[in-house]
Amino acid sequence: MKSSFPSLLQRYVAIFLTVGLVSSLEALLTIEWSFSDCLTQLVDGPVYAPVGIPFPYESQSDASSLAYEFMPHVYLLNLFLLCLWVLPFVHAVLNVRVPFEKKRLRIFLSSLGLFLSCGMLALNFFMISDNVFRPVFSIGDASTRYKEYRPVGLNFKSEVSLCKPLNH
C-alpha cells in the first residue's frame, strides 16, 4: 500500500493544523513574567519583562534594545505542551466540520498548517542568524533566578516592555 503526500496531508490534518495555529498564536500572544527585584533593578537601567506561554523563554537584552535572550529548548517545550493541549479540540472540530470525505478542504487545511509552522520556523532561524535572538541556556541572571519568575498577565507580544512588579 503506497502512501502519497496528499493522502498524508489528508490523514494528519489535525496535527499539521494544530502545530501551525499554535506556533502562530504563540508568536502573537504571551504571558508577561515578573520577579521580586523588578523595581530595585531599575537603578541600573530598564528591566524588561520575560515572556512565554506556559514558561518564560525570551527576554529583551539589557545590553541592546534590539536583541533578545532566547531559550530554544524552553520554546520547543512550550510549543509541545500547547500542541498537546490544543490538539484534542482541533481534532474534534475537524471531525465534525470537515469529515474525511472532504479531501480538498482537509488537504488545504493541512497545507495551511504546514505553511504557518514552516513560516514561524524560518522566522525564528532568521532572527537567530541575524543575532536578534541570542540562544542562551537561561534568561535568568546572577541576581534573578529562572525559578523566581511569576506570571503577571496575558498580553500581545508587541506590547510587552518594562517589567511590572509582582504586587502591581
Image: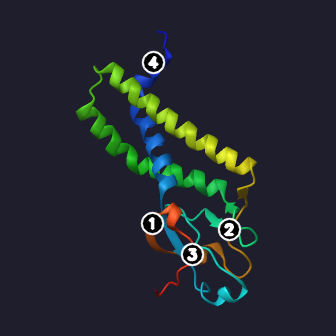
Find the distance from the CA under tag 2 to the CA under tag 3: 10 Å
Find the distance from the CA under tag 1 to the CA under tag 3: 16 Å
Going by the numbered disc 1, the residue's amino acid type is Asn
Q: Which mark is residue 6?
A: 4
Mark 1 sits on what residue?
A: 155
- As helix, strand or loop, the secondary structure at mark 4 comes to helix
In terms of sequence position, does the residue under pointer 2 or pointer 3 come before the other? 2
Find the distance from the CA under tag 1 to the CA under tag 4: 37 Å
Picture coordinates of residue 51 (x, y %)? 55, 66
Q: Which mark is residue 149?
A: 3
Query: Depth check: 42 or 151 in front?
Result: 42
- Nearest to the eye among marks 1 and 2: give it: 1
Picture residue at 73% right of the left edge, 86% below the top = 44
In terms of sequence position, does the residue under pointer 2 or pointer 4 come before the other? 4
Picture coordinates of residue 128 (x, y %)? 71, 50
Query: Depth check: 96 or 163 in front?
Result: 163
Picture residue at 39% right of the left edge, 35% below the top = 14
- As helix, strand or loop, the secondary structure at mark 1 comes to strand
Find the distance from the CA under tag 4 to the CA under tag 3: 44 Å
- As helix, strand or loop, the secondary structure at mark 3 comes to loop
Q: Is the residue marked by circle 3 packed among few (<14), some (14-19), or many (20+) residues within 10 Å?
A: many
Mark 2 sits on what residue?
A: 139
Find the distance from the CA under tag 2 to the CA under tag 4: 41 Å
Going by the numbered disc 4, the residue's amino acid type is Pro
